[in-house]
Amino acid sequence: MSKIVFFCIPAHGHTNPTLGVVRELTARDHQVRYYSYESFRENIKEAGAEFISCDAYDAELGLTPKDAEKIGKDIAFSTHILVETTLALDHTVCEDMTKYRPDCIVADSMAIWGKAAALKLNIPFVSSTTTFAFNKYSAKIMKQGFGELPRMVFSMPKINKDIKRLQSNGYPFRSMLDLMQSDPQTNTIVYTSPQFQPCAETFPDNWMFFSLTAA
């Protein structure tokens, strides 16, 4: 029996795809602990995992509905919120992981606090990607408009400042790309089939594509 820890952001589109994986793991007698938010408690417990609430740490950030609308649209703001959440959870998560000693951490691609803890504590890590997977080939097809480039350039000083805050707390991130993307060596689950994934043939074998509706 393995001990597996999941981390996810409070979004149905990111959480729901993982629940089938959790059910399969618990059905095979693996012990699953899932760090998430109160609105997902019952669904996570129904899937067989032990639920751990992260709400208290989000409350410390004092986010408003207007702030929530900016996440995903403003890269500097999004990075800042992810870094703030990671640092707010830093002591509790690292202490929990040190005591619990999981065999593996599975973290949503946006729940960087899970990835950060895995890297900091040298725990095997799996990235959970509920959007299409990106690499240098697929990015050319799914590229954003030229209007994004100036915003990215002007955002870099703020983003680099937040990266340095993570570094000062023992997290081995060198750049925003380290923070946000999975490299080819990272074991990655992508919740879509290769038939729908652009440039699926360019991803390594340790990136698993599958459909939740597959037989």
Image (cartoon, helix red, strand yellow):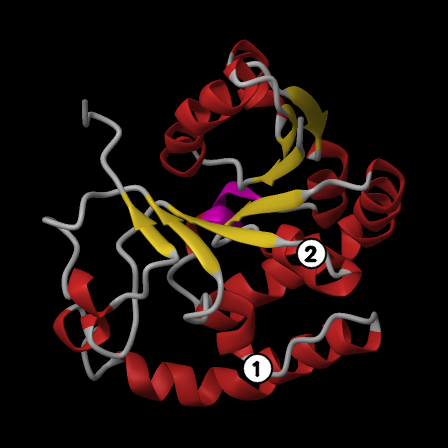
The location of residue 187, given as percent across then percent down, is 47, 56
Q: Nearer the viewer, residue 93 or 99?
A: 99
Residue occupying the point 52% across, 72% down: 76
Residue occupying the point 69% across, 42% down: 103
Relative to 55, say whether 47 is above or below.
above
Residue under numbered circle 2: 118
- Magenta span: 64-68
Q: Around disc 1, counting alpha carbons within 10 Å, would you say few (fewer than 14), some (14 to 19), or many (20 or more)?
A: some
> What is the quadrant of residue 13 in the picture?
top left
Relative to 210, say whether 75 is above or below.
below
Q: Nearer the viewer, residue 114 or 103?
A: 103
The outermost residue toward the front is: 1
Residue under numbered circle 1: 175
Q: Nearer the viewer, mark 2 or mark 1?
A: 2
Q: Which mark is residue 144?
A: none
Is 7 on the left-hand or right-hand side of 192?
right
Q: Is residue 161 magenta?
A: no
The location of residue 183, given as percent across then percent down, is 45, 71
Q: Is residue 65 magenta?
A: yes
Main SS of the magenta part reads: helix
Look at the numbered disc 2 and give the secondary structure of its residue.
helix
Relative to 33, say whether 61 is above or below.
below
The location of residue 161, given as percent across then percent down, is 68, 82
Is 182 on the left-hand or right-hand side of 130?
right
> What is the quadrant of residue 125 in the picture?
bottom right
The amino acid pointed to by label 2 is Ala
The amino acid pointed to by label 1 is Ser
Residue occupying the point 67% across, 22% down: 51
